[in-house]
Image (spheres, helix red, strand yellow):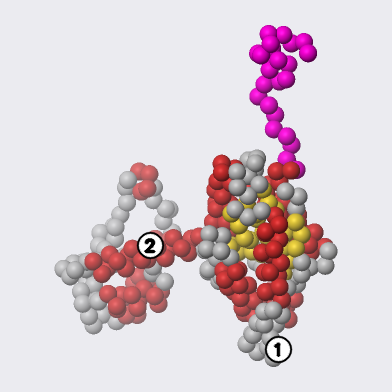
Amino acid sequence: MKPADTDCSSDFPDEALLAELDALRRMLATVDKPDCAVEGDGLVIMRLCSGLTLPEWESLRNRRDLRDWMALPLSANPFPYLTRIQQTLKDLVFLSEHDPLTKLHNRGAFERILAAELIRSARSGQSLALVLIDLDDFKLVNDTYGHPCGDRVIATMGALLAAEKRTYDYAARIGGEEFALILPGVGLVRAEGVIERLIESARSLRIICDGVDMPLRVTISAGIACTKGKLAITWEKLYAMADDALYTAKAQGKDRLHSAPIADLTAPPEKTLVRADEKRFLFTGSIKG
């Protein structure tokens, strides 16, 4: 496909340009994704828009969410445009790893970070705690006050987690009303203290929703799973332990935490590479006691 040979001059109507961009985007959506990253083949489609300034382009881009479209000047200094493109790429990376409502890490980023932190924990022999947190009776909020109010509750909880965590902790929204905290270097007793304070902070929240006369009060339940870093453990296993603990906290009445046994203490003992009688033979030359 060759570029169009007409331009969009300064008096080119915005709506006409947007209509053209929308039509092109719809057309490209029907085309299979190219293997350009593998094969090296690809196509850049250009549209000359003389007289269109960078602020005007950004206004058009924001109106149609055209963040994946790039613009460069033909004669002016390209640096401001390249700076905008670099920021756009950063924004896209952020969006790919974060929940849009709470700005916390999303489920995919959470799984990747937890797996990496568990490897680091096993290598360094340091503790790591995983906490799963769930808003109690959240469905009742949506059913009674509507989903916009439910979103306000979720966003408020996300802000609370972001404010309460340490700089090097990780907070994520991993489901509708379910959150997670990854606490590197934190053992079980310390994690319980952190989450007890978080539960108390949640109790003190007063959330104001449009059209609701009284501020809403919420509670949370939490499940904690911890490893001392003595044994290698998969993120799936630690997650399952924290999930079971969360289920127990819910079953015990909600608005509380429950802790799973420390993962290192429940794991089966490591198998030795050399059996006892083989060790005896290596050191004494005999297999008799």
- The residue at which mark 1 appears reads as 214
Residue 164 in view, yes or no: yes
Q: Secondary structure at mark 1?
A: loop
Please state the extent of the stretch shown in magenta in the rendering. 266-289
User: Residue 179 sits in which quadrant?
Assistant: bottom right
- The residue at which mark 2 appears reads as 89
Q: Secondary structure at mark 2?
A: helix
- What is the distance, in whole Å, between disc 2 and disc 1 at their CAs? 42 Å
In the depicted view, which residue is nearer to us: 17 or 138?
A: 138
Whether 55 is drawn above or below 179: the answer is: below
- Residue 278 lies in the magenta-colored region: yes
Whether 4 is drawn above or below 243: the answer is: below
Percent coordinates x, y for residue 123 in the rendering: 56, 41
Bin the neighbour count of mark 1 within 10 Å (Cα to Cα): few under 14, some 14-19, many 20 and up.
Answer: few
In the depicted view, which residue is nearer to us: 89 or 197?
A: 197
47 displayed left or right of 198? left
Q: Amino acid at mark 2?
A: Leu
Residue found 83% across the figure and 64% down from its top: 252
In the displayed image of the protein, which residue is found farthest to the right? Answer: 252
79 displayed left or right of 42? left
Residue found 64% across the figure and 85% down from its top: 208
Residue 111 in view, yes or no: no
77 displayed left or right of 224? left
